[in-house]
Image (tube, grey):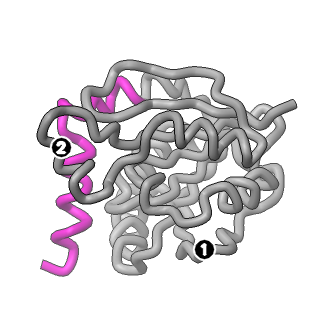
Amino acid sequence: MKNFKANMFNKKASDPKNKPDQILETLALQPGQTIADIGSGGGYFSLRFADAVGRQGKVYAIDTNPEFLEFISSIAKEKGLDTVETIIATENNLSLPERSLDLIFIRNVYHHLSNRVKYFKNLAGALKPEGKVIIIDYTGSGFFSFHRMFGHCTPKETIVEEMEKARYELVQEYDILQEQYFLIFTLKK
C-alpha cells in the first residue's frame, strides 16, 4: 500500500487517453540528452525518458514527495537505469547543474507552483542555450471541470504571460491532448 499513490499516478500517466506515446514522439528525445522531470510523481515519464536518452543521457526525477523518489529509485535500479537521479524539490533550489539540461518537463504541476516567474527565472541557469521547457497543464475547459473547480488548471494566457516575464518565449503548441495544454518554451535570445 505504501506506493499506492505513486502507482496510481503512473497508471494515469500511462492511460492511452493521456497519449503518453504521442507526447514522447513529439519530444523526439535523443540519446545523450539530459532531462529534468519536475513533479515526477511515480516516475512514469522519468523512466521512459531514461530509456530514450540511453546510457549517455541523464534524467533528474524531481518531486516534493520523498516516498515517490524512493519508488522511482527502486524501479530504476530494478530496470538497470542508473542514469536516473532523484532530487527532492524545494521552492528555491533544485540543485541542478548549470547549463546542463536539454529539456525541462513539467506535466500537471504548473498550477501547483507558487511564484512561478521567480521559479522559472531560477531554472533558466540550468538550461542549455537551445534547451526547452515543456509545460503540460490542465485547461479547465468544459461545462463541468473537476480541474477548474479545485484549482488544478491555469489559463494558457497566464502561463504564456508568466513565462514571458521569466524570459521565455512560446515556440510551439500541440493540440494532441483533450484536457491539457502542451506548450514548448525556450529562453528568449
Residue 140 seen in this snapshot:
yes
- Helix, strand or loop under label 2: loop
Asked if labels 2 and 1 touch by Cβ distance under 8 angstroms, the answer is: no
Of the residues shown, which amino acid type is indicated by label 1? Glu
Q: Which portion, as a residue range, is magenta?
A: 1-23
Vertical order, 125 against 15 (above or below): below
On the rendered structure, is 171 left or right of 81?
Answer: right
Expressed as whole percent of the image width and height from the top left, the position of residue 172 reads: 58, 21
Foreground residue, 129 or 189?
189
**Residue placed at 63% from the left, 46% from the top?**
162
From the viewer's perspective, is 122 left or right of 171?
A: right
Examine the rendered structure and indicate whether residue 15 appears above or below residue 43.
Answer: above
**Residue that numbered label 2 is attached to:** 145
Name the secondary structure under disc 1: loop
Please identify the residue farthest to the right as the structure is shown.
189
Q: Nearer the viewer, residue 54 or 127?
A: 127
Quadrant the C terminus occupies: top right
State the predominant SS element of the stretch in magenta: helix
Residue 69 x %, y %: 42, 72
Front disc: 1 or 2: 2
Pointer 2: residues within 10 angstroms few (<14), some, or many (20+)?
A: some
Q: Which mark is residue 91?
A: 1
Residue depicted at 54% across the width and 66% down the height: 114
Regarding residue 82, the answer to whether it shows in the image is no
Q: Is residue 33 above or below residue 74?
A: above
Q: Is residue 166 left or right of residue 110?
A: right
User: Which residue lies at the image location 31% right of the left edge and 27% below the top edge?
Assistant: 177
